Amino acid sequence: SYELTQPPSVSVSPGQTATITCSGDALARKYVFWYQQVSGQAPVLLIYVDSRRPPGTPYRFSGSRSGTVATLTIDGAQVEDEADYYCLSSDSSAQRLFGAGTKLTVL
Amino acid sequence: QLLLQESGPGLVKSSETLSLTCGVSGGSITTFDFQWGWIRQPPGKGLEWIGSMFHTGTTSFKSSLRSRVRMSADTSRNTFSLRLMSVTANDTAVYFCARQTYDWGPGAYFDAWGQGILVIVSS
């Protein structure tokens, strides 16, 4: 079965660039989507169709996908960006797949 | 603005059936532009897709849950529902309902979410 692999945690200082990866065979043929989840709240869509930002997503967030790896980049991470980040994709039978999530620490 | 709100019991006994409903306001569920889905999150863990459906009743479920899951829609009330049978402590989670974009091949995503409801399975 398909899986999406993310690093459990990423830590950066304020103003640095944070990079969160999501890898899996499904990404070779399917789009990736990224969510931010602040503790206790519903996830919020950050990036859709690999690299597009919905209204409201700050420009410091960007996404890309190449082969079986997708990347979420935060240029100039801020303290308020501390959250859990999840990637989402699909497998060949349209099953929705979430990555296990990455906890971003900015301090 | 589309709003989704989960409702249902917050406590379910082990081996019984978990039943939740998602009320949708600000938009109709009777559209083929979107599906309607359920996602859950056990305490301290990640997100898990449970299943999605069209308002017509066409459904797709996570393979490992397929034998225990049912989803249905009530177009007159603009709601859709989840039933998870034979629950165990492993089904304790926050359950989210969400709107899913149409998947024309390369994937789909959830663009609107409810706030979530915690369901605890007790022994």
Image (tube, grey):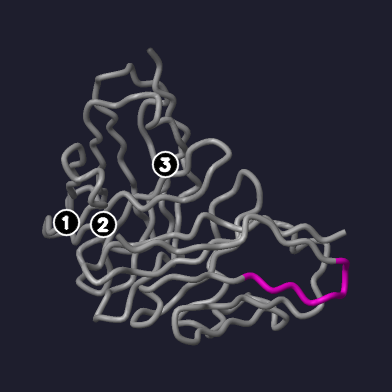
Residue B95: assigned label: 3
Q: CA distance from mark 2 to mark 1?
A: 6 Å
Are both tags, 2 and 1, on one chain?
A: yes
Q: Quadrant of the C terminus of chain A?
A: bottom right
**Residue A59 x, y percent position in the rendering:** 70, 83
Residue A28 left/right relative to B118: left
Q: CA distance from mark 1 to mark 3?
A: 18 Å
Residue B19 left/right relative to A57: left
Query: Callout 1: 10 Å neighbours few (<14), some, many (20+)?
Result: some
Q: Amino acid at mark 3?
A: Tyr
* CB-based contact (under 8 Å), mark 1 and mark 3: no
Residue A103: which quarter of the image?
bottom right
Task: Report the span colored magenta.
Answer: A13-20
Q: Amino acid at mark 2?
A: Ser
- Chain under disc 3: B
Residue B108 left/right relative to A76: left
Determine which residue is flagged by label 2.
Answer: B52
Residue B59: assigned label: 1
**B13 in the magenta segment:** no
* CB-based contact (under 8 Å), mark 2 and mark 3: no
What residue do we see at 47% from left, 43% from top?
Answer: B41
From this view, report whether residue A28 is shown above or below residue B17: below
In front here: A53 or B47?
A: B47
In front here: B38 or B32?
A: B38
- Chain under disc 2: B
* CB-based contact (under 8 Å), mark 2 and mark 1: yes
Q: Amino acid at mark 1?
A: Thr
Residue A44: which quarter of the image?
bottom right
Query: Callout 2: 10 Å neighbours few (<14), some, many (20+)?
Result: many
Secondary element at tag 1: strand
Residue A91: assigned label: none
